[in-house]
Image (cartoon, grey):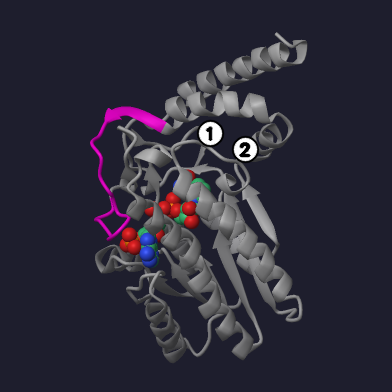
């Protein structure tokens, strides 16, 4: 087993934190970045080795240059770079303050572009490296009340594919994409919210550890794309094949599955600055509820499809 140097942007929470721990357990040397120094220090403790903590904001290019400098100064190279940095905002497009929309797109689309620029520049100098960018099922389908996030993830999907095409001349440089479905992480409660109700991951929900294991596998055996989520392909199929049916169902699906019943006033969450991480959240799903919800949705889809096909 060889020990690699792994930089993780977005390592203070959720999937990034779990990936950092997974790489460290494997014996890799990890360099942890995000905005919150306190949460990064906690991740470093969980990694249990001499993880290097470098607070950095992916929207600030100088921060990323500093991050590369510190990683190379300590370890001499960067073998893998995993970018999971992202923020979210709930609410109808018309209800979102424009500056919140802009900031989400800046973080979730221009952030990965900044990361890719810094990583690829370093990989070209070394002649090797693997970049793992984390997309989303929401780069393949659309949902209401998350316009800024959906816009960013669709843009990121285009950028990721372009980067793959542009690095074809370098056989030891890889650009991979992880496509999670719904994962239980703090992103739902730390999101900005103008929807009136606290968000939650819609079922079926995966763990951050499952995503982390897939990221570690991508780093060991690079692939173009890894979609992880029991219903990802079915939802993509419904979105592509039955647009009217999909659009008719998706609003109810997000209202019932993606928003809890816990009311909340408008706020900008962690969009502009890091907030202390809060694990868990309201109205997480029990197995029985997931089973009932999936059953009800299948029934609703069946009835709607029948109506649509019979023209009634
Ligand atoms: N959870 C899901 O259901 C799900 C589904 C599909 C895709 N994804 C994707 O998976 C990735 C990880 O999400 P997650 O669920 O693990 O979210 P999370 O727990 O909220 O973690 C997001 C990370 O991004 C960091 N971050 C936010 N803004 C940043 C900035 N400007 N510069 C640097 N770091 C920043 C946060 O730390 P600081 O606040 O300290 O900066 C945090 O470490 C994201 O790309 C997300 O879109 C998640």
Q: SS of the residue at dot 1?
A: loop
Q: Earlier in the sequence, mark 1 or mark 2?
A: 1
Quarter of the image where one finds residue 184: top left
Quadrant of ligand 1 in image:
bottom left
In the foreground, 90 or 235:
90
Q: Is residue 121 left or right of residue 13?
A: right
Query: If the image is split into quadrants, where does the N terminus sit?
Result: bottom right
The residue closer to the viewer here, 129 or 96, is: 96
Disc marking residue 230 = 2
Tags 1 and 2 touching, CB below 8 Å: yes
Q: Which residue appears at 28% of the width and 29% of the height?
A: 262
Q: Residues within 10 Å of mark 1 (few under 14, many from 20)?
A: many
Query: Callout 2: 10 Å neighbours few (<14), some, many (20+)?
Result: some
Residue that mark 1 sits on = 204
Residue 94 pos. (x, y %): 39, 39
Quadrant occupied by the C terminus: top right
Horizontal and vertical percent position of residue 304: 65, 15
The front one of 196 and 10 is 196
Question: What x and y, as percent, mark residue 188?
Answer: 38, 43
Span of residues in magenta: 259-277
Nearest the eye: 105 or 27: 105
Q: Position of residue 96 (x, y in %)?
A: 35, 44
């Amino acid at each position: 087993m060889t020990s690699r140097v792994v930089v993780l942007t977005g390592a203070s929470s959720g999937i990034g934190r779990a990936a950092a721990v997974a790489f460290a357990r494997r014996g890799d040397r990890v360099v942890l970045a995000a905005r919150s120094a306190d949460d990064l220090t906690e991740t470093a403790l969980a990694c249990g080795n001499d993880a290097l903590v470098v607070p950095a904001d992916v929207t600030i290019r100088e921060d990323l240059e500093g991050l590369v400098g510190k990683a190379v100064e300590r370890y001499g190279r960067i073998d893998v770079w995993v970018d999971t940095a992202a923020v979210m905002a709930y609410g109808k497009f018309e209800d979102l303050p424009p500056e919140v929309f802009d900031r989400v797109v800046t973080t979730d689309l221009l952030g990965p572009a900044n990361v890719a620029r810094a990583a690829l520049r370093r990989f070209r100098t070394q002649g090797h490296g693997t970049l793992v960018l984390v997309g989303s099922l929401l780069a393949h389908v659309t949902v209401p009340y998350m316009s800024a996030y959906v816009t960013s993830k669709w843009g990121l999907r285009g950028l990721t594919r372009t980067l793959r095409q542009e690095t074809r001349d370098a056989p030891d440089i890889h650009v991979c994409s992880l496509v999670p479905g719904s994962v239980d992480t703090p992103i739902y409660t730390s999101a900005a919210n103008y929807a009136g109700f606290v968000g939650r991951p819609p079922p079926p929900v995966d763990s951050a550890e499952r995503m982390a294991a897939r990221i570690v596998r991508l780093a060991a055996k690079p692939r173009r794309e890894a979609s992880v989520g029991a219903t990802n392909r079915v939802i993509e199929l419904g979105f592509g094949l039955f647009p009217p049916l999909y659009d008719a169902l998706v609003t109810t699906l997000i209202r019932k599955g993606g928003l809890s019943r816990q009311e909340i006033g408008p706020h900008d969450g962690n969009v502009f600055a890091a907030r202390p991480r809060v694990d868990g959240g309201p109205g997480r799903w029990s197995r029985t509820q997931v089973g009932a919800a999936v059953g009800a949705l299948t029934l609703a889809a069946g009835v709607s499809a029948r109506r649509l096909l019979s023209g009634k």
